[in-house]
Image (tube, rainbow, N blue to C red):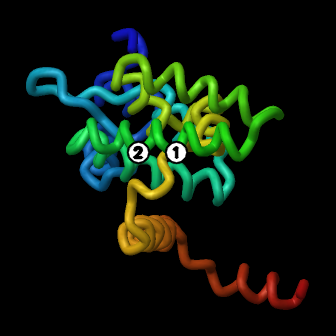
Amino acid sequence: MRTTDLLTIGEAAILLRFPRRSVLDLCARGLLPYVSVGSHRRVRRADVEALIHPVLTRAELEDLWLHQAIAARLIARPAAVLAAAESNLRRLRRLHPAGQEWEWLDRWEALLEGEPAAVLDALTSPARHAVKLRSASPFAGVLSERERRAVLDALAESRRDQARPMRLDSLERVMRAV
């Protein structure tokens, strides 16, 4: 990752038009991934832009959250997670001997053979290429069903936190229209 892809918290606050404290709160809540560079936090430009212009469908957002949990597991146990992904990749190639799936399987294979940072970026980036890549993910089985459910419940809870209550006059207008 180029250093120009990383923004300071202040730069992210300017782009988001948020107070710096709000950006730090997003980081603390896990809604804006960050890396520590010395004693400072840095966020990816793509993550900030994804907050400005959200383009993820609900299913893509679920995939992103699940893959962020897989990224945490990858950091904790890289050999086991990468071995599971490589095994799944071989199985997927047998299941899909031809077709457009091969393009994505080839990309995953190249990522898995490369730097772990590139795999982490594919797992956690809201960028369009990473969204497409995650749709053919070889990381099935890395999270238990209980862990999957916990991640999806956390996503649902975060969406409830972000929901604003509807004003009474707006609710009445909606109800009349229905």
Q: Where is 57 relative to 132, above or below?
A: below
Question: Which of the image's four quarters has the C terminus?
Answer: bottom right
| Residue depicted at 25% across the width and 30% down the height | 35
Assign a secondary structure to mark 2: helix
Q: Which residue is mark 1?
A: 88
Task: Check residue 84 in the rendering and tell me which mark sits there, or answer none.
Answer: 2
Q: Is residue 118 left or right of residue 34?
A: right
Q: Based on the displayed image, in which of its 4 quarters is residue 33 positioned?
A: top left
Residue 130 lies in what quarter of the image?
top right
Kindly give the residue lying farthest to the front in the view shown: 94
From the top left corner, tell me how far across and down residue 163 is, in percent: 53, 70
Frontmost residue, 33 versus 102: 102
| Residue at 29 percent of width and 48 percent of height | 73
Do the residues bearing badges 1 and 2 touch, measured as CB atoms within 8 Å?
Answer: yes
Q: In the rendering, at what x and y percent does residue 175 appear?
A: 81, 89
Q: In the image, residue 153 lies at what x, y percent?
A: 44, 73
Local SS, label 1: helix
Disc 1 crowd, CA 10 A, few/some/many (<14, 14-19, 20+): some
Q: State whether residue 161 appears in this view.
A: no
Which numbered marker is on residue 80? none
Q: Residue at x 28, y 50 (%)?
A: 25
